[in-house]
Amino acid sequence: EVQLVESGGGLVQTGGSLRLSCAASGFIFEDYVIGWFRQAPGKERKGVSYIMIKDGSTHYTDSAKGRFTISSDNAKNTVYLQMNSLKPEDTAGYYCAAESLRNGGLTDFGAVDHWGQGTQVTVSS
């Protein structure tokens, strides 16, 4: 059974940091691109960042560049999103997503094979 389990969300003040974790199981980790999306209340879900597990290459949207860092621990089948200098506009549910390289690998944050259940991040002003 494929599972993506997120953790690490919470309440933080503006300027603070959080590290989100996504623990993956049930598929061959190295064959996937794993990323993070976020969804604020009343808004559509949007991509934040992704990492190609096989070679470690990463991609960030403009909202994440310079403040967020995505990484993976292949021995633990876990992807992390380190979020620094958080702003109130970062408040959202954060969702881990996985797409196989065969299916496109989260290109342009398009189709997703598997979703996690999400973890809430709230940044107070």
Image (cartoon, grey):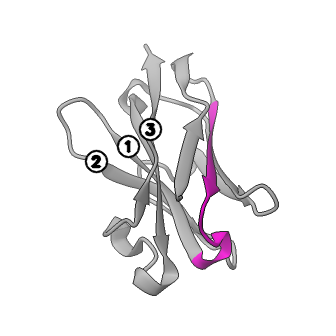
**Mark 3 residue element:** loop
What amino acid is at disc 2?
A: Arg
The residue range painted magenta reads 18-31
Magenta span has 4? Answer: no
Q: Residue at x 36, y 30 (%)?
A: 89
* Residue 39 appears left or right of 25: left
Q: Is residue 29 visible?
A: yes
Residue 21 against residue 55 in the figure, above or below: above
Crowding near the residue tagged with mark 2, few <14, some 14–19, many ≥20 C-alpha atoms within 10 Å: some
What amino acid is at disc 1?
A: Arg
What amino acid is at disc 3?
A: Gly
Residue 81 percent across, percent down from the top left: 61, 46
Q: How many marks?
A: 3
Residue lying at the far right in this picture: please name it: 75
Residue 111 percent across, percent down from the top left: 32, 69
**Mark 2 residue element:** loop
Q: Residue at x 55, y 28 (%)?
A: 9
Task: From the image, tell me which residue sits under label 2.
Answer: 45
Answer with the quarter of the image where residue 91 lies. top left
Q: Residue at x 51, y 20 (%)?
A: 14
Q: CA distance from mark 2 to mark 3?
A: 11 Å
Magenta span has 19? Answer: yes
Which residue is nearer to you in this view: 37 or 125?
A: 37
Task: From the image, tell me which residue sits under label 1.
Answer: 38
Residue 20 percent across, percent down from the top left: 61, 39
Q: CA distance from mark 1 to mark 3?
A: 9 Å
Q: Earlier in the sequence, mark 2 or mark 1?
A: 1
Residue 102 percent across, percent down from the top left: 47, 86
Circles 2 and 1, Cβ within 8 Å, touching? The answer is yes
Task: From the image, tell me which residue sits under label 3.
Answer: 118
